[in-house]
Every structure is written in structure tokens, then in C-alpha cells.
Amino acid sequence: MFTTKYASRVYEGLEERAPWEKEFLQAVREVFGSIESVVSQNPVYEQNAILERITEPDRQIKFRVVWTDDNGQIQVNRGYRFEFNNAIGPYKGGLRFHSSVNASILKFLGFEQVLKNSLTTLWMGGGKGGSDFDPHGRSDAEVMRFCQAFMSELYRHIGPDIDVPAGDIGVGGREVGYMFGQYKRLTREFVGILTGKGLDFGGSLVRTEATGYGLCYYTQEVLNRLFSDSFEGKTVAVSGSGNVAIFAAEKTAQLGGKVVTVSDSSGYVHDPDGIRLDLVKDIKLERRGRISEYADKVPGAQFFAGKRVWDVPCDIALPCATQNEISEADARTLIGNGVKVVAEGANMPTTPEAIDAFRAAKVAYCPGKASNAGGVAVSGLEMSQDSQRLAWSFDEVDQRLKGIMTSIVTESLAAAHKYDMGDDLFNGANIAGFERVAGAMIAEGVM
């Protein structure tokens, strides 16, 4: 699988200990494949057991969450926090509330978060957490009671200079607010222990838009650096219809592109005239409806039940839904239709076989740890504002976000060039993120 004995030995050990952690092993395979030549050229990494240490979380916390629903019935869920690596700063990463949450998914997300946070150059380590609780269909009172019960355990393990969680799937402003309130109640402290807070109590402007906007700033820089081009006049396929997809579509339109698809778990909508974002926001953000409603209201738009958006010809593909949503067959369809750039808005939305297909076809493939780092970048900026008791303007945060995302492209290309890999954004992102964390780990000694 790998050409070096060191990478092979470490990976085989991980696979032997936990073969069921498929998502985590997939993420490790991807990173090791990118960095093994770097590791082989720098024996100091093996001497300091960096691959073993960077793939083993510092701490894995699992706990019971007991709460009472509106019918007075006691409910029991599982809570998790993976504090993965704090070599370059406090653990930082989202909390996910969804029925699919398990240790393997959170472990893969935490591992990816270490390198993603490193790429931002902000002082943030990597972590991830959540619960198998699903807030959909629950009343506000039930969500509040669950969040309070969840934080009643989690508060023991976090702090503004220890671990700063944020939102993720199933955890938005409502859930963050309830958890922040419970933390204050338990500790009697008003500190920045969560990001994604409301603007009235320590939140940051641009946080809602950050991942989608950042994805487009990154993609625009890739178009400029690799093709001397831009979004202007491009047809863009976007999957998903949550915050990332919606604000990626919004920024795409501002940059001159035309988004023609959005989707949810029921299927996708194709609007050849360009997706009307006001309608998508009403359906998905305001009413939490199904995306099929869009086609019922817009002449010329079509809904495709149970299908993915990747059959639609496009210049740029922005997968913003979920992991492994682009298969090898989808990739070959996109390639056949002339796609130029694939930039990930979701975490690991492209299968390994699809990644290989894109790279073989010379498509500019942009890995999520780089292209979707905008969310955590603005979370890091929120941490800075909380520390200073300041609130920056929308434009100030937006410009800082744009600067961070364009610098990630620069760092990724520089790392790829350093190791004679050409303009390889995939390998470059993994190498740049790894080298910064590994350097800090070595400097700080064995721990």
C-alpha cells in the first residue's frame, strides 16, 4: 500500500487494532500516501515516532447523556469528545449531533481537523466530538434539556486555553447557545469556550457564511493561480442545501458564477437558469423543508429523486453534503463533462477511487482539509475576539477569512513544489499541514 516501511508499519498497526474504524483508516491512508516521501526524506520524523503519535488521539472521552423528553420519558444517548492533538494550540473542532455519530467518524474528523487547523496558521490544535442524539423533530425544550445534560459532562474537559468546541452537523446557533448557558451556570465564567455563539454574547460576524465563503475564496485563488481564470461565466454544481452549500452558492454568484444544482437526502434540483437562493434559504433554513419544493415553485427546474448532482455538466464541482458522496463513477461522469476544478466543502466527500480519477485526469482536486477550512478559520478569529473582548466588523472578518484561504493555496503549492510534485494541491495540503504540526511536536519533546 505504501512504498516506505515506516508508513506501512504504522498503518498496519492501526488497521490491526481497529479494523472497524473504516472512516478513520481511509483518512489516514490518504494522508500517509501524500506524506510518506516527505517522511522518508526526513528521518527525524521516524526517530520521534511522529506517525504513531499524530494518529493516536491525546484523549478519547466517552460519556452517557441522560435527559427527559416532553412526555416525561427518560432518554439515554452517548456523548464523545476526541482531543486529538494540541501541539500548535488548544484542541479545536466541532460537535456533531446526528444518529450516525460513532467513534470512527469522530476519530476521522478529529484527525483531519489537526491538519486543517494547521493550514490556517492560527494557533489551534485538532479535536472533534458529538452525540448520537438527533435534534430533528425535537422541540426546543427537548433540545435544551439534551444540550444541558451533554454540557454537564463535557464542561469538565474544555476551556478557552484547553479545548474550544464549535458547531457541526445538527449543532447550530440554538444548540451552541444552550450549551454555552449551561457552561456558565456550572462554572460561573463567561469565557470563549464555544465558537459559533450568538452575536449578542461573543459570536463573530461571518461565522455562518464562513465555510461556504471560504470555499469560494480558495477556489477563486486556485482558478487564478493554475488557470489565470475566475468564477466569471462558469457553471457550478453544488451538492447539499445546508449552510455550507447555500453560502458557497451565494459567494459563487457574487464572483460571477452560476450555480445550477442543490440537493438534500431526497434528491437534487437542477435549475439551468441558476438556483434562486432566496427560495432555497426559505425552504431549508427557515422552514426546514425538502428541496423538492423548489421544483414545484420554479418553472423550468427539475427534481431528481434519489439522485446525486454529478450527472449535471459543470465547470466547477463543489461537494458540500457528506462524506464519500462522489464515487469513481461520479468522478468519471464529471470528467467526461469537462469539469475543471473539484473543491470540497464537506469533509471527505470524495472516495479514494474518485480522487485517483480526478488526479489522473489533471482535474484541480482541492481536498477538504484545505478548501473547507473557512469555518474553523473564522472560529479561530472568534476566539481572538473573545480573548480581547472585541467585535470586528463583517468586512474585517471577511477580509481576514479571504486572506487565510488564499494563503492556504500558497502554502499548499509551495509544499508541493518543495518536493517536486508540481502544482499538486492534494499532496501539498497534506504536507504543509503535517510539517507544521510535526515540527511543533518535535520541538516540544516526547509527551
Image: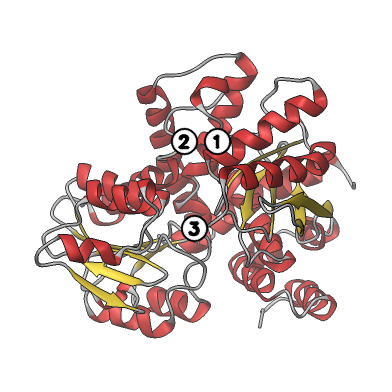
User: Which label sits in the foreground, 3 or 2?
Assistant: 2
Query: Percent position (x, y) of residue 352?
Result: 52, 77
Q: In whole angstroms, how far apart are the C-alphas of marks 1 and 2?
A: 6 Å
Q: Which residue is mark 3?
A: 368
Looking at the image, the residue that sits furthest to the bottom is: 329
Q: Which residue is mark 1?
A: 196
Circle 1 — which element? loop
User: Which label sits in the foreground, 1 or 3?
Assistant: 1
Residue at the image point whose x is 40% and y is 19% from the top? 393
Circle 3 — which element? helix
Instruction: Evaluate if marks 1 and 2 touch, with contact meaning CB atoms under 8 Å apart.
Output: yes
Residue at the image point whose x is 74% and y is 25% from the top? 184
Instruction: From this view, report whether residue 291 is shown above or below residue 256.
Output: below
Q: In whole angstroms, how far apart are the C-alphas of marks 3 and 2?
A: 18 Å
- Could you tell which of marks 1 and 2 lies nearer the N-terminus? 1
Q: How is the image coloured?
A: secondary structure
Query: Percent position (x, y) of residue 385?
Result: 56, 21
Q: Which residue is mark 2?
A: 207
Q: Is residue 112 left or right of residue 263?
A: right
